[in-house]
Amino acid sequence: MNRMIAVLEKEGNVKENGCSYRISPAAGDLSQVVELKVGLHCDECIKKILKAIKKIKDIETYNVDTQLNKVTVTGNVTTEQVIKVIHKIGKTATNWDDQEGQLQQQF
């Protein structure tokens, strides 16, 4: 599983598995980038995560990188909101920066 899945651009359209999606930009310029480490074990896990992320209000973009097990969400959202949504579907998620810090401390 060495691929990138579904990038949704601000005020744009994206095709994913033959379906087209459109999203409106978040209100104001309060955009944040949330990067999380998430276990992406199989296609079913990825589908569940994508479905959950798409339901988050005020997102502008999202990206799931299966090679890095990384989920990136941009918009008027907090890290806590995105983690809560991912935990709700039974997946674990941690802040990407925390993961990098732990790796540096090990060396």
Image: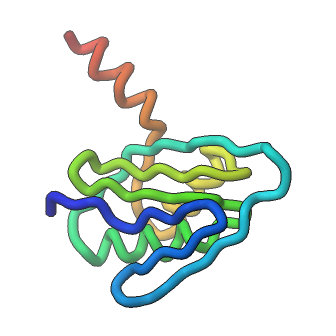
- Residue at the image position 42 percent from the left and 52 percent from the top: 71
Residue 1, above or below 38: below
Residue 71, above or below 42: above
Q: Kindly give the residue lying farthest to the bottom in the view shown.
A: 18
Q: Kindly give the residue lying farthest to the left in the view shown.
A: 1
Q: Quadrant of the rendered structure where residue 40 is?
A: bottom left
In front of the other: 55 or 24: 24
- Residue at the image position 55 percent from the left and 62 percent from the top: 9
Q: Position of residue 74 (x, y in %)?
A: 59, 50
Residue 17, above or below 27: below
In front of the other: 83 or 11: 11
In front of the other: 101 or 54: 54
- Residue at the image position 36 percent from the left and 30 percent from the top: 99
Q: Position of residue 21 (x, y in %)?
A: 54, 81
Residue 27, above or below 99: below
In front of the other: 53 or 29: 29
- Residue at the image position 15 percent from the left and 58 percent from the top: 2
Q: Quadrant of the C terminus?
A: top left
Q: Position of residue 60 (x, y in %)?
A: 63, 59
Q: Quadrant of the rendered structure where residue 43 is?
A: bottom left
Q: Kindly give the residue lying farthest to the front in the view shown.
A: 12
Q: Quadrant of the N terminus?
A: bottom left
Q: Position of residue 38 (x, y in %)?
A: 36, 51
Q: Disc count in the image? A: 0
